[in-house]
Structures are given as C-alpha cells and as structure tokens.
Image (spheres, rainbow, N blue to C red):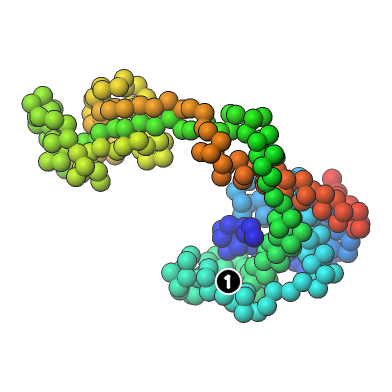
C-alpha cells in the first residue's frame, strides 16, 4: 500500500466543512464535487504545504478532486479503518518524527494553525485513500515477463548503470590547514594511503582514504565532484577548500556508465512496468468515479 510522505500528513489541514456565502464571495470556489466544494484557498494552501509553484495549480486541484471522489467511493463501499489502526499509525509518527514526544506534535500543529482533530481526520482520510487505491489498483497490477522484456528492449536509456569512481581522499580539519605543505612533502616520499592514515580526518582514513567504486554525486559535495571530473585517472588534485576543510583527491579508477543486463535491471524493470500499469488502471478507475458524479471546475 502506498502512503503519502509524513511531511504532508503532519502539515495537512482538513478543508472547512461549512462555507458561508460571504466566504464564497471573498474566496471563490475552485471546484464543485457533488455537494462538496473546494475553495481556491484550499488549493493554494495545499500548494504552499508542498512547496509547489503557481503553474501546478490545476494539477493540485485535480488531485484534490480525485481525493474527494475516492473518499466518496470508500463511504459507499462502507470501508472503515479500525480505531486501533489509526492510533498505531499516530504513535508510529510520534515515535519516528517527534522522538516519542507528543507535545512536539501539538506544537507543530499549532505552528501550522491546525488542530489535532483536523490533523487526525486528514490522517484517517489518507489511510482510507491509500486502502482504496490498493484495493482497486495496486493489488490488481502485475508485471508479466513479456511486458518486462518489451520494456527493457524499448527503453534502454532507463537501464544504465551509473558511472563509478574509486578515489583516495585526504581531509584536513580547519585547525590543521597549516599542515598542507607538510602533507604535500610527505606525498613525494610515501604512499598516499600511508599519509592518509596518519593525517586525514576523513571517515575512510583507516582504509588509506580509499572510497572504492562509488557514485561521486551520492557521497561527495558538488565541489569535490567537479574536481574529480576534471582529473584524469591516477592524477591528484590541488587542495580544495570547503568551509575551511581541506580536501586532497586522487582519482584511482573510473568506470563509465554502461548498459545493464536484464538480470541486473530486473527490479527496476519490474517497478517501471508495474508503475505504468498502475497509472492506467488508476486513470480508468477515476474516470468511472467521475462518470457517477457531478463535477464542475471554476475558472
């Protein structure tokens, strides 16, 4: 079952249940879904919570319409989430996000100008939506061997192994920056690994400063990645200063990106096939729900 990120769960505020005529005049209705309304301010609030740009307005509104349709379908099917399941989910969030401190959750909700009952209801709605999606979509999707082979053959660019590099690093703390010259002199006489073990503050110093077979962007700062990209195999960089820390790099090995075998890419292929199949099943399901509802979107 897929779940939305905790950030959305923690920040979410349930839309106002009753809307006065004056509020509608000032705010404006974004959409009508049967007897339920979505205000423009609801959409804008959702966008602010997710940090989305103005051009995402229509997409967010569509997601909110779909959510209302799914909750309506859940109600019609009499789907319920038992109270103990909801409470377990809340305890899990408090434990993982707030270090077990319920008061920190309440403080966060206060900062978001949301009440605990509102947040709990939104959490419950999220669980219902996820349960409905699993029931109607995810459990009905599979990745057949034929579909996987076709996906692999049709989209080779999706299945490239990342380029990898083996690099040796010497890292000096800010207070040790005056040792640069000393390290440079020693490197003319001793192996890089020996000097790294004696001087480096890097986490791999005990291994001679060696970071073996890594994707640089996953483990190093952009400044380090750029310096590595400019080095030829076997070359050593000059000192790189980052926030007072001194980095010295040697590129030991470099492996270019390559096409993965079907076996290597199996999990990725399966995930892509399932994702594309699920998107189609979901779209068909939403279309059926829309056909049974009155929906009007206002400009």
Which residue is at the front of the view, 108 or 76? 76
Residue at horizontal 70 percent and vertical 39 percent from the top: 147
Residue beneath disc 1:
89
Residue at horizontal 62 percent and vertical 75 percent from the top: 85
Residue 270 coordinates in the image, percent (x, y): 62, 44
Residue 228 coordinates in the image, percent (x, y): 33, 27
Figure check: 186 above or below 275: above
SS for dot 1: helix
The quadrant in which residue 46 appears is: bottom right
Residue at horizontal 41 percent and vertical 40 percent from the top: 218
Q: Is residue 85 visible?
A: yes
- Residue 9 lies left or right of residue 232; in this view the side is right
The quadrant in which residue 153 appears is: top right
Residue 239 coordinates in the image, percent (x, y): 23, 29
The quadrant in which residue 25 appears is: bottom right
Q: Residues within 10 Å of mark 1 (few under 14, many from 20)?
A: some
Which residue is at the front of the view, 239 or 289? 289
* Quarter of the figure with the C terminus: top right
Residue 106 coordinates in the image, percent (x, y): 53, 72
Which residue is at the front of the view, 182 or 178? 182
Figure check: 299 above or below 140: above
Image label count: 1
Residue at horizontal 65 percent and vertical 39 percent from the top: 148
Q: Is residue 19 visible?
A: no
Toward the bottom, the furthest residue is: 84
* Quarter of the figure with the N terminus: bottom right
Which residue is at the front of the view, 86 or 297? 86
């Amino acid at each position: 079952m897929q779940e939305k990120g905790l950030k959305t769960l923690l920040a979410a505020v349930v839309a106002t249940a009753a809307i006065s005529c004056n509020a509608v005049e000032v705010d404006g209705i974004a959409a009508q879904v049967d007897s339920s309304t979505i205000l423009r301010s609801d959409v804008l609030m959702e966008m602010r919570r997710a940090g989305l740009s103005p051009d995402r307005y229509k997409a967010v509104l569509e997601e909110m319409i779909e959510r209302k349709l799914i909750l309506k379908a859940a109600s019609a099917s009499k789907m319920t989430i038992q109270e103990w399941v909801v409470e377990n989910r809340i305890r899990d969030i408090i434990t993982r996000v707030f270090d077990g401190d319920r008061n920190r959750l309440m403080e966060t909700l206060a900062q978001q100008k949301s009440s605990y009952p509102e947040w709990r209801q939104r959490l419950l709605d999220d669980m219902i939506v996820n349960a409905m999606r699993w029931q109607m979509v995810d459990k009905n999707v599979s990745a057949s061997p034929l579909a996987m082979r076709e996906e692999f053959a049709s989209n080779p660019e999706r299945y490239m192994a990342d380029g990898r590099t083996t690099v040796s690093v010497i890292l000096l703390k800010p207070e040790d920056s005056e040792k640069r010259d000393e390290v440079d002199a020693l490197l003319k006489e001793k192996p890089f690994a020996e000097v790294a073990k004696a001087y480096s503050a890097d986490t791999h110093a005990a291994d001679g400063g060696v970071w073996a077979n890594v994707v640089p962007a996953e483990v190093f700062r952009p400044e380090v990645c750029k310096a590595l990209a400019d080095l030829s195999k076997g070359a050593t960089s000059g000192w790189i200063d980052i926030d007072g820390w001194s980095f010295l790099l040697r590129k030991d090995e470099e492996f270019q990106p390559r096409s993965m075998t079907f076996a290597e890419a199996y999990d990725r292929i399966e995930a892509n096939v399932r994702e594309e199949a699920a998107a189609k099943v979901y779209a068909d399901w939403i279309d059926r729900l829309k056909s049974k509802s009155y929906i009007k979107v206002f400009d």
